[in-house]
Image (cartoon, grey):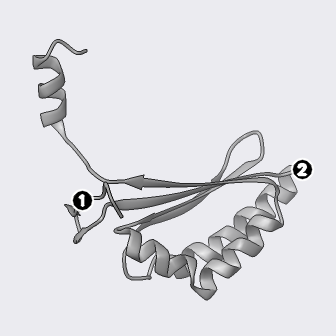
Amino acid sequence: MAGYTRAWNGRCYGRGMVRLNVALNAASARRAHELLDAFRFVVMGTRVEPGCLACSTWVDPDWTVHYLEEWATETHMRHRVCSDGFTSLLAVMESGLEPQVQFDFVTGRRGLDYVSEVRAGGGS
């Protein structure tokens, strides 16, 4: 995997954190809460998996249901995608309207050193 570097993500060294974002449109408030309950069931098992940094779900006022997973490394995410738990997640996704699924590969993190660097360089 060219372009990836091993970086500390707060828990271990790896090829960078991977974030899964899912958004589902619901036809009604009731359906949104049904999807939310289904995602909450998935969240409980996912949070205890090795490499899981975060897992949450919520509903927006427009009945869009969101689901988020953050994994320490791509290896952890690959394991997740091949798991039975992910099959359950796919079933929930398929039951919503217009599922939007996005994997974000985060290869580095910076703190206030970034602010200092940008400001010292004039901000552009």
x and y, in percent, of residue 97 in the image: 84, 54
Instruction: Give the quarter of the figure containing the C terminus.
Output: top left
**Quarter of image, res 52:** bottom left
Question: In the drawing, what numbered circle is on residue 45?
Answer: none
Gap between marks 1 and 2, in whole Å?
A: 42 Å
Q: Which residue is mark 2?
A: 27
| Residue pictured at 22% horizontal, 15% vertical | 123
First-in-chain label (1 vs 2): 1
Can you say whether 79 is above or below 26 in the image?
below
Quadrant placement of the N terminus: bottom left
Q: Quadrant of residue 11?
A: bottom left
Tag nearer the camera, 1 or 2: 1
Q: Residue at x 71, y 72 (%)?
A: 90
Dot 2 amino acid type: Ala
Q: Residues within 10 Å of mark 1 (few under 14, many from 20)?
A: few
Amino acid type, mark 1: Thr
Q: Is residue 103 left or right of residue 116?
A: right
Q: Nearer the viewer, residue 75 or 33?
A: 75
- Please give the residue where the numbered disc 1 appears in the rendered image: 5
* SS at mark 1 in the image: loop
- The residue positioned 15% from the left and 18% from the top of the image is 119
Residue sticking out furthest to the front: 2
Residue 118 x, y percent position in the rendering: 18, 23
